[in-house]
Amino acid sequence: MKQIILLVIILIIAMSLRANKQELMIRIISIPENTPPEAKIFIAGNFNNWNPGDPDYQLQLVDGKYQIEVDLADLTAVEFKFTRGSWDTVEKGIHEEEIANHRWESNDPENTLEFAIANWRDFCEDSPAKPHTLSGEVIYHENFYIPQLDRNRTIRIYLPAGYASASNRYPVLYMHDGQNLFDNATSFAGEWKIDESLEKLTQQGKMEGLIVVGIDNHPTKRSDEYSPWDNKKYNCIGEGDKYVDFIVNTLKPWIDEKYHTLPDKEHTGIAGSSLGGLISFYAGCKYPDTFSKLGIFSPAFWFAKKPLINYFKNSPIPKNCRIYIDVGTAEGDNPQGQKAYLNDAKEFNQLLQDAGIPDSNLKLVIDQGAGHNERYWAKRFPEACLWLWSTP
């Protein structure tokens, strides 16, 4: 009798586990014509630490279509992209543009997703095999130690024209995703063209000079470092608080000692896109005596919306802080995602207005038809930069 009861219990547990198990069938229905015949296609996402060549996540060819079944385990949402084994071979859009991560949430009734890959990055015109595209002087500091996270990182620093021969001191803008700011050859997702834009603005006499400090992102912990809070849906362990502490308490003092900076808050800003926009907003709340200018490009506020709003209400941004927010109307790869980006940008702008920040210190830009990639951030950066450093 005991054996029968034990077998029944085991059966019930097995059935429960099976019922709770979520699997997502992902299928590629078409690939670019220039895809090598021997190509292996992988999926990289928040379920495998964004490993672009993970053998456990290689798609298999079944009836002429590449497919894979992903066990979601405890995840209720996933983000992913397709590669041929590295980020240099990641998928791109129909116009060779960078595309947003594909997203799926457990409340989506469809458990089979089909995709058409338009292009591969290494076969596009802006392939990383092209020569470097640096303008002006950009200095690299490799293996810079982050004591708060016990990791090393490359720091890329743009110095304004005439820096070496002048005795001037310059304002500083700290930016995330440093690989993508200055050089197409080092970029994994397109280039912001920060150096070209600032060189041009200086030549035109619109800016006297600006130092930009770019902090490379971590290849597998980007969302961890750019969110102060955990997000179990996307397998994120929030390390954003430590990351911001690193910028303020370790990196900034070093930059101010080594370079000709204007170290006060009136001349210090922080900016980034997507999750980089979220962590920049958080930095403005936590360190109001350090940053007086926030550049929030295409912010992924949805990733930690409720805790960020609560934090803002308890640690409001000063009224004399200048805050630039922008968003495209085609962010995300589905109507739901596009709506979330657009509405959240508007909502946070309204929160800032309700908190008493004057309109002269707020700027909301809605870019019609713009997507979620470096091409559009590069387009909007010059005007954003001019506005942030102008006098209201």
Image (tube, grey):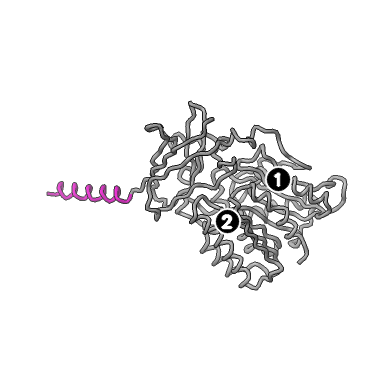
Badge 1 or badge 2: first in the primary sequence: 1
Image vertical order of residue 159 relative to residue 317, above or below? above
Looking at the rendered structure, the kind of residue marked 2 is: Thr
Picture residue at 76% right of the left edge, 49% below the top: 198
Q: Which mark is residue 193?
A: 1
Total marks drawn? 2
Query: In which quarter of the view is residue 323 placed?
Result: bottom right
Residue 35 locus on image (x, y percent)? 52, 30
Looking at the rendered structure, the kind of residue marked 1 is: Lys
Residue furthest left in the image: 1
Image vertical order of residue 236 relative to residue 68, above or below? below
Of residue 70 and residue 256, the one placed in the foreground of this image is 70
Q: Disc 1 to disc 2, how far (Cα)?
A: 22 Å
Picture residue at 63% right of the left edge, 63% below the top: 286
Picture residue at 71% right of the left edge, 62% below the top: 292
Packing grade of label 2 (10 A; few <14, some 14-19, many >=20) is some
Query: In which quarter of the view is residue 93 placed?
Result: top right
User: Label 1's element?
Assistant: loop
Magenta: main secondary structure: helix
Q: Which residues are magenta?
A: 1-20
Determine which residue is flagged by label 2. Answer: 329
User: Label 2's element?
Assistant: loop
Picture residue at 73% right of the left edge, 61% below the top: 265
Packing grade of label 1 (10 A; few <14, some 14-19, many >=20) is many
281 on left or right of 386: left
Q: Quadrant of the C terminus?
A: bottom right
